[in-house]
Amino acid sequence: MKKILLPLLLVLGLGGLVFWLVTRDKGATISAELRDFAVADTAAVTKVFFATKQPKTLTLTKESNGLWMVNGKYPVRRDAIKILMNTIHGLSVREPVSRMAKESIIKNLATGGIKVEIYQGEKLAKVFFVGNETPDMLGTYMLLRDAETGANSSEPFIMELKGFNGYLTPRFSVNADDWRERSVFKYFAPNIRSIKVEHRSTPTESFEVRQTGPSSGFGLFTTNGNPIPFDTVAVKQYISYYNFIGHEGQAVNLKPAQQDSILRTTPEHIITITDAQGKVNRVALYLKKNDGIAPEDSTAAMPPAFDPDRMYAYSSVDKEMVQVQYFVFGKLLPPTTYFRRAGK
């Protein structure tokens, strides 16, 4: 019995070893250079360039102060650049593309993919193409290009990010609005010298907050310059709101003619901030026509004429129309009684 059992175990063991060697990594014979998508030192990355065949391009650049800019014009959201750096650092091959699908995938990447160029200083460190998601939505088709010779790899891969369940294409967006910091106001409170708020519908509730220095006194006045009694804590809290106030994105639903029409109307509210350097930022808030949203009160005869949740905002600094929420901006538009809550 032992004489039969020993050869049988030996055959089973050899069979298992052969099976493991065959199935352990279908791409093991593919050159490591063709699989090397990841960027080891993301701290050295100074520029990322995206391009599509449409053509559409986008450039992210790291300034000398460490901040990232979109197309040299707008600050990049910190969370967005962090996600991108984590992605290019952690890119790994899930599996090679099958021989049957390889030609089609390469063609799709060449015609519809996003070219990504990653620079470290002046050196072009990495180039690859990002394609669509796999059928299971858990992988992304990619193709590497030699950064020195400019030759495309002959092998596309299905790429993944360990620990992330999803595809990676959206992380390489060529839409500037997906990257830029969506701030309408972003001020260090002691650097604000005055905030003037004008209400069209209730002009008597308009006001101006003045701050004479980083640790000096405050003042609250009507827009005609008459002093208004106030609670110092309430004023300080109000100024702190301007640390960061964001928007939802550009009003891409509006055609240029529609934007011009809105800008010719009278704003519902105007917020004007002057900083310690004398720089003025005037943000006009316009009512947004309702898109047919029904009111919560089902007994109402018809939806309100204007959107109950959102407005349009136009900044004299950025000179663009964006969409904002009352939920976010409401605290910037109080009546003067807000500042008297301490009984003054």
Image (spheres, rainbow, N blue to C red):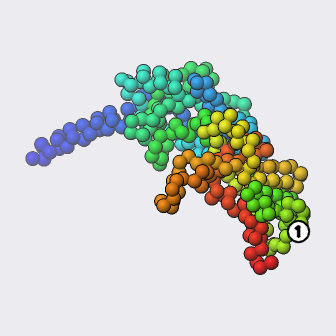
Q: Residue 24, how many percent across, how many down? A: 36, 37
Res 215 seen here: no
Q: Residue at x 28, y 36 (%)?
A: 19
Other residues around mark 1 within 10 Å, as few (<14) / some (14–19) / many (≥20): few
Residue 326 is left or right of residue 38, and the answer is right
Residue most extreme to the left:
1
* Residue 275 image point, x, y percent: 85, 54
Q: Residue at x 84, y 49 (%)?
A: 280
Frontmost residue, 30 versus 189: 189
* Residue situated in front as seen by the camera: 14 or 57: 57
Could you tell me which quadrant the C terminus lies in? bottom right
Q: Residue at x 12, y 42 (%)?
A: 4
Give the residue displayed 51% in from the left and 39% down from the top.
168
Q: Is residue 238 left or right of residue 29?
A: right
Nearer-the-camera pick, 293 or 162: 293
Q: Residue furthest front?
A: 301
Judging by the rendered image, the residue that carries numbered circle 1 is 227
Secondary element at image label 1: loop
Residue type for callout 1: Pro
Q: Is residue 117 left or right of residue 33?
A: right
Q: Residue furthest bottom?
A: 343
Foreground residue among 246 and 330: 330
Q: Tell me where residue 248 appears, x and y as whole percent.
A: 62, 48
Q: Position of residue 303 (x, y in %)?
A: 54, 53
Quarter occupied by residue 199: bottom right
Residue 228 visible: yes
* 283, above or below 256, in the image: below
